[in-house]
Image (tube, rainbow, N blue to C red):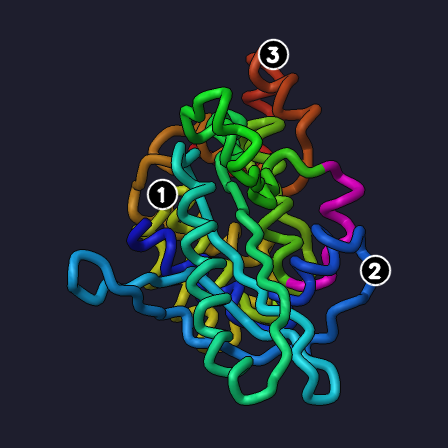
Amino acid sequence: MGEKDITEKTLESYNDVFADILNVLLFNGKQIVDPNDLEDQNPHSFYKADRKFRELERDVVKRWKKQNIRIACIGIENQTDPDPYMVLRVLGYDGTEYRAQMNSIRKGEKPYPVITIVLYFGYKERWNQPTTLYETLEIPEELRPYVNDTKINLFEIAYLTREQVDLFKSDFRVVADYFVQMREKGEYNPGNEVVQHIQEVLRLLNVMDKEKRFEEKINEEVAEGKVNTMSEWLDKVIKTSETNGEVRGENRMGKLMIILLKQGRTEDLDRAVDDSEFRNQLFQEFQIA
């Protein structure tokens, strides 16, 4: 997934974000996983095929431990497009991890479960590819009793309910809110909550929203401590866009739309589209030439 994959991994690699994703999506908001009980695991693994060693790279993978007892190995895979062979990929990741545990088992350690969750970030269409092994393969009927079915743990972030989004306590709440809003209305109106890992969130949303022309300036502002909320970020985007004459700021209606969305004045925006007199009043109010 290239650049998108890198930005997603950066945010999710923080223990507070990783634990928050698990607590909301797996445990309905109950604080089951403590960030302090997570430890990084190498996302790279190797297997032998055709007499050659080949590499598997997971997006993010961590071990969940309690008092030095391993509870599970949990991985997160990110998808921006539906993958028809996602089930096979997940089976490969999980199987490779179980195979790696064999060395520890021989030393007297107990095996532990491997869990993979797939986060789908698409908001223009729902996941429309197989989620089970039976759906992925063409299996003759006489063989079905001998083929163990399996499914992927798929979560469509843009299709979470508002109640689910509100359960997030980490910066992933901003990410989830962004995709839900983009699905619902095609625009994003940020809140004023302080973001802990704002650079990582901004990089992710900039890539997803294709606003990479603002990334350098935004990162400079963040590094200097001038931006701490998503609302402040959007304000910087607006000012940069207007100064440089970029797409979003090259016409009066575009400027007005962004300002009203930033302020949450969606009713005024709807009225401005149909009422030219009211629209002109707003142009004067915000001094939009």
Residue 12 appears in the picture as rendered? yes
Magenta range: 161-170
* Residue 19 located within the stretch drawn in magenta: no
At label 1, the amino acid type is Lys
At label 3, the amino acid type is Asp
Q: Secondary structure at mark 2?
A: loop
Residue at the spot of label 3: 275
Q: Nearer the viewer, residue 127 or 214?
A: 127
What's the distance in space between the residues labelled 2 and 1, CA to CA?
A: 34 Å
Q: Is residue 183 above or below residue 177?
A: above
Q: Quadrant of residue 248?
A: top left
Upstream in sequence: badge 2 or badge 3: 2
Q: Quadrant of residue 154?
A: top right
Residue lying at 31% horizontally and 41% vertically, measured from the top left:
246
Residue at the spot of label 1: 210
At label 2, the amino acid type is Lys
Residue 205 appears in the picture as rendered? no
Q: Is residue 4 above or below residue 248?
A: below
Q: Secondary structure at mark 3?
A: loop
